[in-house]
Amino acid sequence: MWERGRPPRKPRPSLIIVPPPPPPRLNLLLPRSLLALAARAMPSRRPSPFLLVLLALALALLFLLLSPSSPSASRLSRSLASGSASATSSPASPAAPPAPVKIYMYDLPPKFTYGVVRSYTAARAPSGSADAAAVLPDEQLRYPGHQHSAEWWLFKDLLRRGPRDRPVARVDDPHDADLFYVPFFSSLSLVVNPIRPPAAANASGVAAAYSDEAMQEELLEWLERQPYWRRHGGRDHVFICQDPNALYRVIDRISNAILLVSDFGRLRTDQASLVKDVILPYSHRINSFKGDIGIDGRSSLLFFMGNRYRKEGGKVRDALFQILENEEDVTIKHGAQSRESRRAATHGMHSSKFCLHPAGDTPSACRLFDALVSLCVPVIVSDYIELPFEDVIDYSTISIFVGTSKAVQPGYLTSMLRRVSSERILEYQREIKKVKRFFEYEDPDGPVNEIWRQVSLKAPLVKLLTNRNKRLVERGTNGTDCSCICSTTPTDMTTAG
């Protein structure tokens, strides 16, 4: 009740303690729905001051725990951040490069390496004169200019490689090795004795004493005394035999090993395979073309210079000579290896749009790689050719392949080439220039590194086969073997025009 004549007294409001508003960062952690839920839990008309104080203290404690200065919050933030980063960035992160394959190079007796070079030069020294190479230290010797010089490049490269190089690393302890390299200069050894020896042997008589067959036998006798050769029968060993006749006397005794070859022309299918072996490019014998792409200075349509008469698959050369030698814009010449021939070939390839590569005694030859470094588009007439590095090079973009049966038809080859537009020739040259380094052994990022990459890819197969052989028992055979990894003769040849 109130006194008459006075307005009613308003009730004194109770003191309400309002908690301070949460910081902006807290709104990210506590949604408004949570605060609303807490408010609904309180009395609707007059919230208790005690409850409000408790709520304020709880919110303050939660804020301290989640603030950046809190160690717990920091650990939580770092954990969330790292998890979020890994979830978002892991698909785009590049994979770690594989560990290098470890290779051990045998320290062969010098007669199998530098000694072969000395024997080669001694065999060509004029009669009665001193052999200059005989007094040079090993590090000053130079490998003779030779289309099979890959054996020299690989040997010198391994000498400088360390335990962390890629794709293969050289190790000093054979126990650590995945593969074993045998650095015998087998291709040079094959030609130490010249076809036309000097009129008389030189003063040392080295030329008359050298025997490549004896060297092959001595090499295998030396290897067969090594425990790491006997361990797996040489399956984890690597030989280079780039000349088609290199190591021919002992090839059956090393056919388990990885062979570095130029083609399979002289090898049986039970001796070599694309699966276990590596195809190498020949060393080019002419100077590389240093200019840019273009056809303005290439007046000749087609160029070839080489031996006209070859055996086996090379018989196609004589047929091509008969068809092409009277074509007005075609240069086709018979010529053997000589300094003058190389100069003529350099000029011819550098001034021609297309360069012919017919099969010789074997499907491949250095002429193909001479053409590529000349930016002269190769026209390959060799049905059974194998080519190096085909997992990274698409040869259909840098060469024209013509089946032998079509190439020997009069008029077919030249009419086909004349239909190739200038723009298409420039496209071929542009693609050749992209991969040219794979055929220049002097390039630091050239074929040597690519050969080692190819060799490193064989290591898992070697491991599979060596482990498999450990558990095999003696068994009969029904004429087939599921483990056969040898190549097969192609039954079909795709002709590209």
Image: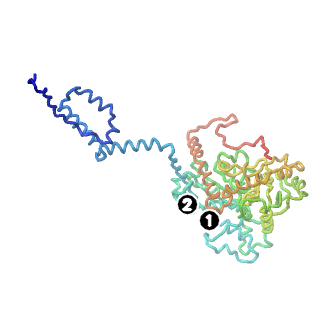
Which residue is drawn at the image coordinates 83% and 57% (left, top)?
Answer: 301
Disc 2 residue type (three-letter): Arg
Q: Quadrant of residue 334?
A: bottom right
Circle 1 residue: 110
* Mark nearer the viewer, 2 or 1: 2
Do labels 2 and 1 touch, CB within 8 Å? no
Q: Residue at x 67, y 65 (%)?
A: 116
Left or right: 109, with 245 as reference point: left
Label 2: few (<14), some (14–19) or many (≥20) C-alpha neighbours in 10 Å: some
Q: Nearer the viewer, residue 111 or 63?
A: 63
Residue type, label 1: Pro
* SS type, badge 1: helix
Q: Where is residue 302 shown, x and y percent of the image?
A: 83, 57
Q: Residue furthest top?
A: 1
Q: Residue at x 31, y 43 (%)?
A: 73
Q: Is residue 471 above or below residue 352?
A: above
Q: Percent from the top left, x then y, of residue 243?
A: 72, 57
How many residues crowd mark 1 within 10 Å: few (<14), some (14–19), many (20+)?
few
Q: Position of residue 153 (x, y in %)?
A: 64, 62
Q: Residue 161: which numbered mark, if any?
A: 2
Q: Quadrant of residue 37?
A: top left
Say how many tags the image has.
2
Between discs 2 and 1, the one toward the N terminus: 1
